[in-house]
Amino acid sequence: MIVCAMFYALYPLSRLLERVSAVWQKAPSVHVNGREVWDGGGEQQQTGRSLQRNSTQRSAHRPQHKHTHTHSPQGTLVETLERGQVEEELHKTLCDVSQMEGVLSETPLAGLEDTHHPDPVKNQAESDNITQEVGLSPHLTADAPTEADGCDGAGSLMQGCSAGSGGAALLESRSPVFGLSALLSDTQQFQMDAEPVGWHFPVGHGLAEMCYCPYVQFPDVSYYPAFQDHDNIEVMWRVWEDLSEPRSSDSADASPVFDFSIMSYNILAQDLLEANPHLYTHCAEDVLRWENRLQSILKELQIWQPDIVCLQEVQEDHFEEQMHPILIDMGYTCIYKRRTGSKTDGCAVFYRSERFIQLSVSLLEFRRSECELLDRDNVGIVLLLQPTAGPNHQFTPVCVANTHLLFNPRRGDVKLAQLAIMFAEIHSVMQKCRSEGKSCELILCGDFNALPRSPLWTLITTGQLYYHGLPTWMVSGQTDLSYKAHHNRLFSPLWPSSLCITDRCQYKTDTHTTASDGKQQYSHEFMCQLRFSDAACVRPADLELIPGVTDKTPDPGDMFNLRFSPCLRHRLSLTSAYSHIHPETLTDLVTTLNSEGAAMVDYIFYSRRQKSRFNGGKESSGGLKLLARLSLLSEAHLWSLRGLPSETFPSDHLSLLVKLQLSE
Ligand code: KL2
């Protein structure tokens, strides 16, 4: 017995000492923002929520690192840890270790294998808690109270401003390569003599050079010193993915092109952050402070210099007092639309005045007094921009649309109606453009509060959605409410005809256009409406009577279906610029993360240049081509960076940034 007890008491202690000595000998770790980073693989069942606790615990025990921000020549944000700080850290951590030894000698039999927390009893209790919470916590919760009614009180602002500089040249792309064995290895690795595996990170010029990090430090050894044998390790988490194809030597390919970049970014309104503190329990106070977040948001804009910026959750006072003056100085024209009712945030679009001329702007409110369904305060902006080019070239205008659809996961019906209004306005703007004989391209950005492959996403990307009997909670895919006995389902018509929007997501009043030859052209929708009008039902006397065909009695069922079929459609042919799966690791990529979960809900959709069947599969002229996109991260990677918001990423969403090419 005594021998047994001695073994249990001394074994963990010896493990600890071994680790300390191993770390002293050789244990440089991966650092981001001057802090060690969890690589997402140490404990198989570890979730974001448990990680968040680790990081909180750690920050309570350790002094904040001082770190410096540097900009690489490409404007890439990199942060470097200084060696002196590391050594200071080392000293402090050793003190932690000796304290821990004291605790362990008092409670030798409890929580021996777990070195996360100095107090093993507390540790056990916490991990139970975590498991429970993870099991019970819904991915996302309904927001009925926060999305409550309110009276209209829209604030909008449009401002012109001076010119700024153009977009940066396309960076050479290289995706990060992660050593899988490093992800799966455990702390035993520190005792091995063999050459350890590590991570490779793209760094430096064009991200082509690789930085080799020989060791990865896991959360369960996070009490141990952070020691580096390099002066600096620069780690870059988001890299440019180059999607451009080499240009062929064809004469057709020599046509002029207009390259530009566009960003979509939900910057997390401070009022919403403060209204939902339970979503940010994993964050240090500092990263939640608006002044700090604003600086990081502006820095991101300065680094990437997007030609067009579509923001969501922009708080009105922050926009007017802080962002707008700075953005004007940066050379942007700014358009802002606040949400209606008592909501204090809204959508904004900024574009470089030097690169685009504004042809039209529509500020949309989705709350409609005539329609009971549309009682929410979300808004959208639809712009028509003319790219500025040399005197000899005229590129087609680009319609830029930005929105933040309703969050409430249960109200897919409202989301679809809001999207239909957006589509109807876009269609109207593009039709107007086409009626002047020009073609028109489209970029639709925003936070759609819907997951990839959800019915709402399917409608956007395929142009149609058969929804008959679909439960409303299923529309966005945000949460699974199938366990509920009763749920509302979607049936035709989705909204009353008083909204004047058809099931093709077009305004009913968009009856005709004037073609370039001056002839009036009536839309199919318009003609269908007239089908059973009195004038149309006057049957010429000599017309042969064929019941159901040439008689004048319409079939009521037919009439109903004609006006609103159980299928929503649109003809905007949109493609998502981002894939929702990492091409190498096949993990889900996310655009938002908080204490309750992570998901992809933000998108940049664009009208893609079509391949023509008639010219040997080559791309037809016109249309947008995706050149590059700034890579996204998986949930595990984001948690390894302490979740969102963080010092590196100032919102609970990541920015989406793509480079597109317009050809004549
Ligand atoms: O998911 V969002 O966050 O696109 O990042 O959009 C909404 C939510 C935003 C505007 O309504 O506020 C957030 N639980 C969690 N998040 C909420 C809730 C809620 N009940 N209500 C609003 N939001």
Image: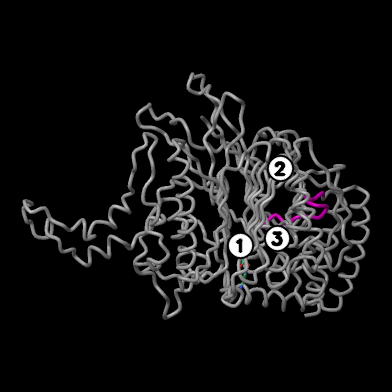
Position of 291 compared to 338: left or right?
right
Q: Earlier in the sequence, mark 3 or mark 1?
A: 1
Asked whether 421 or 311 is in front, the reply is 421
| Magenta residues (range) | 28-41
Asked whether 288 or 624 is in front, the reply is 624
Instruction: Give the image quadrant in which the ligand numbered 1 is located.
Output: bottom right
> Does the CB distance between marks 3 and 2 fall below 8 Å?
no
> Does the CB distance between marks 3 and 1 fall below 8 Å?
no
Nearest to viewer (mark 3 / mark 2)? 2
Residue found at x 81% / y 60%: 291
Residue annotated with mark 3 = 644
Q: Residues within 10 Å of mark 1 (few under 14, many from 20)?
A: many
Asked if ligand 1 lies within 8 A of label 2, the reply is: no
Residue annotated with mark 2 = 304
Nearest to viewer (mark 2 / mark 1)? 2
The amino acid sitting under disc 2 is Trp
The numbered disc on residue 308 is none
Residue found at x 65% / y 40%: 240
Of helix, strand and loop, which one carries label 3? loop
The amino acid sitting under disc 1 is Ala
Whole-angstrom CA distance, mark 3 to mark 2, is 20 Å
The numbered disc on residue 598 is 1
Above or below, comparing residue 231 to residue 377 in the picture: above
Asked whether 555 or 519 is in front, the reply is 519
Magenta span: predominant SS is loop
